[in-house]
Image: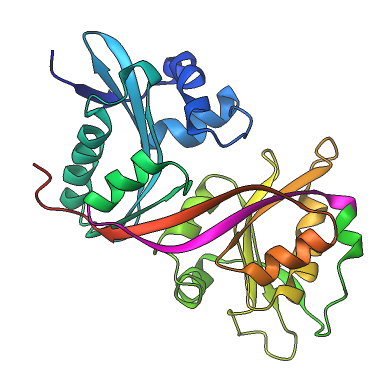
Amino acid sequence: MALAHRPAAHDDYATFVRLFPELDTGDPIPSPAHWAAEIVPGTWLFEQDGEAVGYLFFERLDGVGYIRHVVVAPERRGQGIGVAMLRAAAVELRAVGCATWCLNVKPGNLPAVGLYQRLGMREAYRSTALRFAWAQTDALPACERSLETRAIEPADDAAIEAAFSLPRGQLAGGRAAGRVLLRLVDPAEPSAVHLGFASFNPDFPGAFPFRVADPEFAAPLLAGLRPHARADKPDMGIVAEADPGLTARMVAVGARVHMEFSHYKGQVPTDMS
């Protein structure tokens, strides 16, 4: 029977719970509330012979498709399901005006890396996911500049996305999902948007993206996020994207490397036959 797909529904959560660990991120399985509010709207469930064989979670941003999860059931790997899922996504993305797409993958996942390369994607940079206790951030060296944090207003989105080479619409998507969006501000130059920003999920907890123009700016940005942390979540995570200096600064105060991954991007193919 041919592979078919449909939009995910809230009651597909059990299937999601079964398949999510195949991402091998070491992250906890998102809660039913997180699944329903943030993952279901962008997820397709793929079925064959009435059986769920995988799911695809992706965002349709302004001109860019961001593939978040590509998961094939372990017993169905090697059957071309992954490429069929991406073929379906490519058709959808082209239809809504997305000419490019991107995703993150663990460098050691050679089958996935090979697939993405065959689809024309190339590695743009490498990132490091870091985990640490909030208390460890007290040991970060003080920033020499007097920087403050301020909520990111919708009017700031385009300038911040341009300054940090983000897909257009990514900040709006985070805001719609209830993220805490903060940017660094220099009171002497309040209009400057290139200093740093973060999109923080207190429930996870973690910040992604977390971008700073200089690693020393991590201290004031984390200090601004900390009041938004939940009392029952003493730990925190950030992703240092193409920023070994930030990684080194956090590791120096005891942060542990949770995972390393590569960011791939390319043109959405028009022909994936």
Q: Residue at (82%, 63%) from the top-left corner?
A: 252
Using the rendered image of the protein, determine whether residue 201 is visible from the camera's viewpoint. no
Q: Is residue 35 magenta?
A: no
Q: Residue at (43%, 41%) from the top-left corner?
A: 109
**Residue 190 screen position, x and y as percent:** 67, 84
Q: Residue at (56%, 37%) from the top-left corner?
A: 25
State the residue in front, 122 or 62: 122
Q: Taking 185 as reference, is 58 above or below it?
A: above
State the residue in front, 186 or 216: 216
Split into 4 quadrants, where in the image is the N terminus?
A: top left
45 to the left or right of 190 = left
**Residue 235 screen position, x and y as percent:** 80, 43
Q: Taking 155 as reference, is 222 above or below it?
A: above
Residue lying furthest top in this view? 50
**Residue 103 screen position, x and y as percent:** 40, 51
Query: Residues in magenta?
Result: 119-135
